[in-house]
Amino acid sequence: MDLLQSYADGNEEEVDQIKAGQNEDDERQSPNSSSSPDSSPVRTISLPAKSAAPKVDDTMLSLTVAASQRSLSKPIDPVQHAVSFNPTYDQLWAPIYGPAHPYAKDGIAQGMRNHKLGFVEDASIESFLFDEQYNTFHKYGYAADPSSSAEGNYYVGDLDALKSNDGLSVYNIRQSEQKRRKLEKKKELSEGHDLEDGGDGDGDEVENPATEAWLKKNRKSPWAGKKEGLQTELTEEQKKYAEEHAKKKAEERGERGEKGGEVFADKSTFHGKEERDYQGRSWIAPPKDVKATNEHCYIPKRLVHTWSGHTKGVSAIRFFPKYGHLILSAGMDSKVKIWDVFNSGKCMRTYMGHSKAVRDIYFCNDGTKFLTAGYDKNIKYWDTETGKVISTFSTGKIPYVVKLNPDEDKQNILLAGTSDKKIVQWDMNTGQITQEYDQHLGAVNTITFVDNNRRFVTSSDDKSLRVWEFGIPVVIKYISEPHMHSMPSISLHPNTNWLAAQSLDNQILIYGTRERFQLNKKKRFAGHIVAGYACQVNFSPDGRFVMSGDGEGKCWFWDWKSCKVFRTLKCHEGVCIGCEWHPLEQSKVATCGWDGLIKYWD
């Protein structure tokens, strides 16, 4: 009964249906009930059907369907990598919605940029049309907008100029210009008819292509211009320029020959207090009391002085011969400077005679003169004291190395290794080329005299060493192995028995200077990084140490006997290109680098 009561609150129609269902069930269950009237009827109650399946919420399904319908009109997220439906043209070209990106310039994220001003889209446009619009914009200030649709004819830029020019491009011709050209053509036609009728032109002149009559008759030829418009006389300014140019060319031919180097005014500036002291001694005179303090050399430990004055890198340094009281430096700022070492430590004189960077420098035996080689293709011979250029030499090629014959009686013989694979020999007294050594297959990098200056060794970009007899242009020894690299710097050991060659595979190789010029396989100095740089290699005056700069600004010292690294000094920012041991003060070393500094170490 309680169960019936719980369903009594339902709908009346539902109750009627339940009762009807009960009657039908009774009839099905007891078909013979009419035959036994005495028995009481069995009353059964059927409950409404219940499903065991869980109830499904179709809200998300309806939302998904609605979202798919709405996706056809919503904007596309510019940061998504894939689009799951076919967007319309309007969706693809719609502006970006929402607030600006807080960490992106102009609202465009860094990942979307392909140009410093934002995102540049690819566009298909004919080169002629692009040139037309580009030139039109630069001339008139307006151009067709390439992003506008084909239906509209939109322009960008100066719209007032667009109206005044009626939208003309640089390739369109105005009506007035067209009329002017038609009139000129008619005039030329009438002149041509006059000539054909036998006007002022002779029959022979009309037939001769060199005459003006023939040009006027044959108007279709490319020379049929307006002859009266051609300039016949030069203006005063043009005459003046032509005279100056001719004069300059004549000077170049007179001084340097047809293939000489660049012309540059030679000048020098003295920076010291006075060029002569109270006793009349020159400023380059060495101190008389200077002599070697010790036979043994020691590795320097600390920086004692820095010379700065070059505005660009320093490519080479050389101590004054025998005494070392002055140091000469070649700069990439086209200047050569000489510095005091013992006293003030200041720049004493600047030599300006090259128009480009100076590549190499070399003192004569007594230090009163020196050579410079520059990238302006000139070799100059300077007086150290006065700063005057004694003579200039050039082959029209860049000299990479310059040397004088070390013999006292041959100090007038100059050798230069050039970029055209030759070693050129001059007699500086006459200024004539006396010999050319032409066997190398690449630019010549070094020249080193050996065997009491009777022979010299050269290295080149062709990765070979060649030994020459001085004065005879025939190679007496050719050294080239498959494993060899280019050797941009070579130095002679103080005992003259060995050569140290800076190889570009980051090692220093040792060659004997005796008859066979063999590679000493037991001696090899490595650890530094010089690949790509012509870092100078050098010896201590007693021959106990080998030193070299490297590409990281360090100066390396090795022990000659053990071949072990003795010490490294961090000398420069960038490349340490040159290093020289002081000839008298055995523990002092000078280095130069591409940071424009020369440093003195003790």
Image (spheres, rainbow, N blue to C red):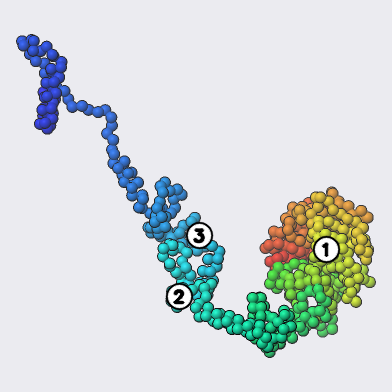
- Distance from label 1 to label 2 (Cα)? 64 Å
The first of marks 1 and 2 along the sequence is 2
Q: Nearer the viewer, residue 122 or 11?
A: 122
Residue found 43% across the figure and 67% down from its top: 153
Q: Earlier in the sequence, mark 2 or mark 3?
A: 3
Graded by Cα atoms within 10 Å as few (under 14), some (14 to 19) or many (20 or more), the crowding at tag 3 reads few
Label whose residue precedes the other's in the sequence (1 or 3): 3
Q: Secondary structure at mark 3?
A: loop
**Residue 307 visible here:** no
The residue that mark 2 highlights is 166
Relative to the observer, which residue lies in front, 239 or 424? 239
Amino acid type, mark 2: Asp
Q: Amino acid type of disc 3? A: Ala
Q: Nearer the viewer, mark 1 or mark 2?
A: 2
Mark number displayed over residue 421: 1
- For the residue pair 555 and 344, the one nearer the viewer reads as 555
- Between 487 and 34, the residue placed more toward the observer is 34
